[in-house]
Image (cartoon, grey):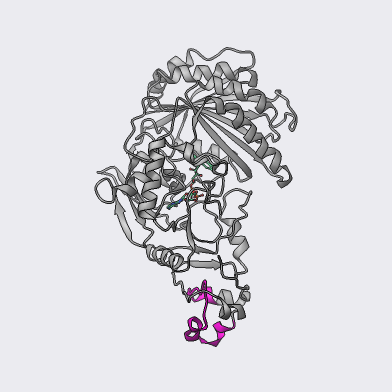
């Protein structure tokens, strides 16, 4: 589908960049004639290419496959060290809405698809697609806050840490991602399991009041419940198959509690079932402002690479989002009073903390490596998920890998939104390793773990599931999946935007 062209000499390419004029997807001598003989010298094949002429002029930087910096720029698109093999036709580091509109029109005129990247945190590198004009929105980091209305207008590239910092200055907060480096763009579109989401609007995507976006036909529009409501509906959880480029989110924000209480517990792996049941049973009765997470980890000193339960731990963290420690203590007392007894349990209860401190601690553990991730919602208890994965975790090929398990929100209020899949519990498998030679055994470990829990499964969390295993459909209710497809067909009839990776549109 792509016209072939040989790489332009690097010096020529960079001189084009320095003039901020990008000659891209060039074809036909007439396109080059007004640009003087110097540009004609770019490449003989440019003159012979079989495309109609097309010139993309944007204020941001455009990197084409012909540029010397292409490969390093392509690899930098992804947060993790496991890089995609897909090769966008152009990488456009957009700086303005006008850039996006120009690039969308350029893609349409040249039979290319559009892919969108904000922070590149997708576990499956879903933004990096063949034959695409890849719009990199990494510079869309503006923030403005209306303290009276308790709303914020933010660019998609604003990260959890940046947003919290700005909000704290106004005693406000938002259910940001659990890692400081994750930006709002893909997180919100994918539903958003953010800090204390139970109290702050439900899923983070339910806090979206409106979006500004560029449509498939190159219009820059606003969408909310009254104007262009299809787009708002889809942006609230439509995830990496959304059919538009979001340039700003309009969000509800919340009063900041004065503190977060942190309690942590650790047991040998063998106790995971009783620990999971304890979490699930208590979560039914705890107030909304209590969050909890369980994780299976390997002690760094334990042996790895063979089945060995020693050195594997089951840890639980609880967080109370209150103004005082007394309030936290009272809210958490049912849990504290019923901690499963075991030899070697360690606990550290009700320590004063803040979301920023928690983000810093978590960021120190989630450093770029090679990742394979997947997950499953289930109406069974966390103990059941734990019991099914206990032995499998003890055989994890990498000591860095982890299993996360969390209760799903009780009595979730369902606004009319694309996001529609959750249950009593969710389990996440993360294979984490460094050596590319270990890829296959880590892929296999995640796939086998999913096989073990599938029988109790209900569906998947779109933002962290393995789309390449074809899981997009199972991340929505049947009705919402159908509606998403119908809206995509109506608003992007020619399929300009890449759809979900692994949904038959895999390039
Ligand atoms: C370390 C780490 C921690 C995480 N923690 C959490 C967490 O606590 N809670 C949670 O819910 N998720 C979490 N995630 C998952 C995360 O929300 C998703 O990976 C999300 O896609 C990241 O956003 P991004 O902008 O970096 O996505 P990208 O990788 O840049 O893009 C992914 C896809 O999103 C779409 N997209 C992105 N930006 C736009 C835009 N502006 N307009 C239209 N479409 C767009 C595109 O389809 C693209 O293919 C975490 C991920 C990582 C790596």
Using the image as rendered, state which of residue 491 and residue 401 is in the foreground: 491
- Residue at 33% x, 47% y is 232
Q: Residue at x 60, y 69 (%)?
A: 67
Q: Is residue 26 magenta?
A: yes
Q: Is residue 12 above or below residue 390?
A: below
Which image quarter: residue 129?
bottom right
Q: Which residues are magenta?
A: 16-41
User: Which quadrant would the N terminus be assigned to in this image?
Assistant: bottom right
Q: Residue at x 42, y 58 (%)?
A: 494
Horizontal and vertical percent position of residue 424: 45, 24
Q: Is residue 94 above or below residue 499?
A: below
Quadrant in the picture for the C terminus? bottom right
Question: For residue 453, which quarter of the picture?
Answer: top right
Q: Position of residue 9 (x, y in %)?
A: 63, 76
Residue 220 in view of the camera: yes
Judge by depth and name the residue closer to the eye, 11 or 129.
129
So how many labels did they put on this image?
A: 0
Q: Return the x and y of residue 396 as percentages of the image width and height.
A: 68, 31
Front residue (pair 311, 503) = 503
Q: Please say if 349 is above or below 239.
A: above
Q: Is residue 174 visible?
A: no
Q: Quadrant of residue 312?
A: top right
Q: Is residue 5 magenta?
A: no
Q: Position of residue 381 (x, y in %)?
A: 50, 20
């Amino acid at each position: 589908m792509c016209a072939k062209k040989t790489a332009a000499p690097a010096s020529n390419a960079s001189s084009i960049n320095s003039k901020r004029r990008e000659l891209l997807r060039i074809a036909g001598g007439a396109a080059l004639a007004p640009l003087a003989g110097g540009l004609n010298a770019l490449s003989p094949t440019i003159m012979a290419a079989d495309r109609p002429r097309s010139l993309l002029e944007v204020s941001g930087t455009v990197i084409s496959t012909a540029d010397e910096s292409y490969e390093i720029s392509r690899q930098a698109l992804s947060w993790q060290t496991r890089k995609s093999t897909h090769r966008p036709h152009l990488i456009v580091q957009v700086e303005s809405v006008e850039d996006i509109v120009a690039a969308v029109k350029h893609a349409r005129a040249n039979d290319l698809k559009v892919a969108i990247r904000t922070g590149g945190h997708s576990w499956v590198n879903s933004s990096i697609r063949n034959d695409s004009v890849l719009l990199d929105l990494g510079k869309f980091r503006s923030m403005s806050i209306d303290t009276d209305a308790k709303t914020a207008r933010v660019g998609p590239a604003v990260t959890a840490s940046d947003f919290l910092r700005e909000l704290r200055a106004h005693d406000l907060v938002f259910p940001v991602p659990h890692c400081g480096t994750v930006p709002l763009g893909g997180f919100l579109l994918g539903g958003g399991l953010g800090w204390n989401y139970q109290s702050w609007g439900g899923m983070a995507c339910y806090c979206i009041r409106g979006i500004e976006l560029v449509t498939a036909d190159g219009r820059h529009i606003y969408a909310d419940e009254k104007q262009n409501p299809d787009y708002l509906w889809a942006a609230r959880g439509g995830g990496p198959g959304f059919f538009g480029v979001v340039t700003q989110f309009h969000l509800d924000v919340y009063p900041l509690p004065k503190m977060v209480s942190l309690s942590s517990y650790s047991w040998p792996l063998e106790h995971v079932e009783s620990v999971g049941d304890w979490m699930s049973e208590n979560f039914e009765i705890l107030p909304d402002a209590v969050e909890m997470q369980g994780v299976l980890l390997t002690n760094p000193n334990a042996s790895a690479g063979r089945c060995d339960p020693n050195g594997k731990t089951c840890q639980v963290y609880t967080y109370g989002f209150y103004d005082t420690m007394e309030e936290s203590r009272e809210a958490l007392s049912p849990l504290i009073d019923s901690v499963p007894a075991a030899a070697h349990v360690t606990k550290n209860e009700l320590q004063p903390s803040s979301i920023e401190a928690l983000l810093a601690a978590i960021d120190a553990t989630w450093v770029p490596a090679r990742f394979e991730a997947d997950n499953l919602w289930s109406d069974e208890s966390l103990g059941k998920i734990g019991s099914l994965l206990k032995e499998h975790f003890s055989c994890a090929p990498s000591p860095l890998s982890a299993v996360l398990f969390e209760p799903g929100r009780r009595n979730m209020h369902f606004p009319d939104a694309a996001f529609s899949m959750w249950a009593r519990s969710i389990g996440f498998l993360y294979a984490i390793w460094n050596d590319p030679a270990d890829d296959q055994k880590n892929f296999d470990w995640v796939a086998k773990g999913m096989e073990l829990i599938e029988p109790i499964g209900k569906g998947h969390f779109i933002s962290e599931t393995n789309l390449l295993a074809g899981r997009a459909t199972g991340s929505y209710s049947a009705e919402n999946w159908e509606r998403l497809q119908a809206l995509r067909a109506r608003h992007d009839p020619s399929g300009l935007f890449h759809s979900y990776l692994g949904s038959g549109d895999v390039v």
